[in-house]
Image: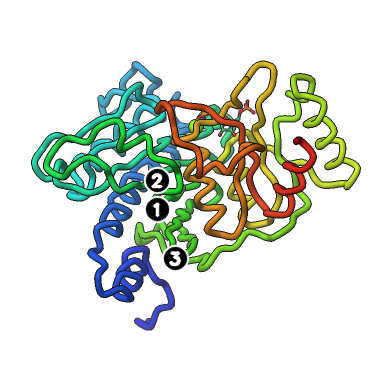
Amino acid sequence: MNSNRKLMTLDEFTIHQTRQFSNATGELSTLLRDISLACKMINKQVNKAGLGDVLGTHGATNVQGEEQMKLDVYSDQMLINVLRNSSECAGIASEENDDFVAFEDEYSMNSKYVVMFDPLDGSSNIDVNASIGTIFCIYKRVSPLGTPCVEADFLQPGSAMKAAGYVIYGSSTMLVYATKLGVNGFTLEPSIGEFCLSHPGMKVKENGKIYSINQGNTNKLNDKLKSYLNYCMDEEFSHRYIGSMVADLHRTLIKGGIFMYPADLKNKNGKLRLIYECNPMTYIVEKAGGLGTTGNENILDIKPQELHQRVPIFIGSKSMVEKAVEMIN
Ligand code: AHM
Ligand code: MG
């Protein structure tokens, strides 16, 4: 047995980063630790999702007599419960809830940060055992400390974001986390139940050869978008589309490429949510050297008008996104 180890846990990594700044308080690291805890609980349920029918379905009870919950509801409640107990979170907004939730105990009201999340993105993929994920982002509140947080705290442009990340529940479970210092990936080591640094300093390739879009929507696209898809085919790019944004963007981050959910005849503003999906993913991709845009403006420059606003998105390798923007305008 040898106690010399190369593994660095998420906690060790954030402590190491915090020590580099004399004025760092470690509050963001605490918040990240809390979010990662909720995601480990979600991961546990996702891993046994196929046993749903064996252990009891939604509305039924499992062998332990516990009521079964749909996984996206479970994930939402898990994140809310953990963040409510956190010492660093004043409130949350979630894709699963109509309105934001302000935590009104004294600790929470004196916390600086609010968190937005999509608790289980791509959940229609659960049935087919494809990768799904949790997406989150963290902002400093604009309302005064000591009071409950307000809607304006959640309607800040992405450029004000302090950190963002996602957890992908895939062939392994990974947490990818971005701050102004860069993007790092941590893989869950199940035997010790810790996320360990596995992908330090992630960078998205400047150019790529993969395009990712729901090509079944082609007939609903305008002519310029159609010609861009023809260009991708003429260039013999590979087409990959899982239908789970976290999985499609994780591949884009690692292999390069472009991911798109444009506006079409049915989805006039695209399908994906600005606050819960497009903003955090753009922050991560941009900190890794890529780009995220609606086709007309940078995603992070948009001032959200409402919590569940949708926007078109083109995101990934910088050169590919720039080429798409040039062709669709
Ligand atoms: P969800 O938040 O309801 O899971 O929907 C978002 C998902 C994304 O993960 C994915 O990119 C997109 O919807 C796929 O949509 P479509 O089936 O229209 O291609
Ligand atoms: Mg979603």
Residue 33 locus on image (x, y percent): 30, 55
**Amino acid marked by disc 2:** Cys
| Vertical position of residue 195 compared to residue 298: above or below | below
Q: Residue at x 49, y 61 (%)?
A: 183
Q: Which mark is residue 163?
A: 1
Q: Residue at x 42, y 59 (%)?
A: 179
* Residue to which mark 3 is pinned: 181
Seen in the image, is 321 located left or right of residue 32?
right
Residue 74 locus on image (x, y percent): 34, 31
**Amino acid marked by disc 3:** Leu
Residue 89 locus on image (x, y percent): 23, 45
Q: Is residue 55 visible?
A: no
Seen in the image, is 223 located left or right of residue 165?
right
- The 10 Å Cα crowd at callout 1, few under 14, some 14 to 19, many 20 or more, is many
Seen in the image, is 240 located left or right of residue 183?
right
| Quadrant showing the N terminus | bottom left
Mark 3, ligand 2, within 8 Å: the answer is: no
